[in-house]
Image: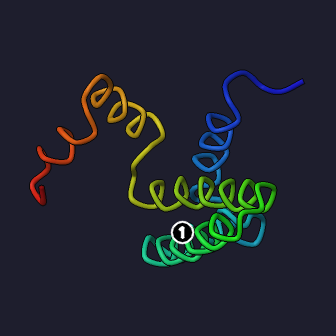
Amino acid sequence: MSAPGTAVDRLAATIAARKGADPDSSWTAKLLAKGPEKCAEKFGEEAIEAVIEAVKGDPARLTAEAADVLYHLLVMCAARGVTLADIEAELTRREGRSGLAEKAARPEG
């Protein structure tokens, strides 16, 4: 039986728990110890792999790569002190607003 919350909630909690852990004991701790820039680089690599699988059209491979992207996104954010709750709050703020309106309201418009 799984712990309460979604798989993403549990993943975010695990990542938070690994912050400051011994890098020899955890892949997540090892990534975080390398700093935000390395975490961002790894996220970018995983995102490219997901794009490649999306183009190839294999749903199972895309699913696996998408899971890697979510993990590395959360690690990258954790490296900069951004939590899943922060991301969820931003998504909630955007609810009910047109994507076109949201994009137009951004400074880079």
Q: Quadrant of the N terminus?
A: top right
The three-letter amino acid code for the residue at tag 1 is: Phe
The type of colouring in the image is: rainbow
Q: Position of residue 40 (x, y in %)?
A: 47, 71
**Residue at x 54%, y 69% (from the top left corner):** 43
**Residue at x 42%, y 33% (from the top left corner):** 88
Q: Position of residue 74 (x, y in %)?
A: 53, 53
Q: Position of residue 57 (x, y in %)?
A: 71, 63
**Looking at the image, which is closer to me, 104 or 36?**
104
**Residue 45 in the image: above or below residue 85:** below
**Residue at x 43%, y 77% (from the top left corner):** 37
**Looking at the image, which is closer to me, 50 or 24?**
50
Question: How many numbered badges does the structure rendering display?
Answer: 1
**Looking at the image, which is closer to me, 56 or 40?**
56
Q: Quadrant of residue 4?
A: top right
> In the rendered view, does 69 fall on the left or right side of 107?
right
Residue, far right = 1
Q: Position of residue 63 (x, y in %)?
A: 73, 53
**Residue at x 45%, y 55% (from the top left corner):** 77
**Residue 77 in the image: above or below residue 31:** above
Q: Quadrant of the C terminus?
A: bottom left
Disc 1 marks which residue?
43
Local crowd size for mark 1, using a 10 Å CA cut-off: few (<14), some (14–19), many (≥20)? many
At mark 1, the secondary structure is: helix
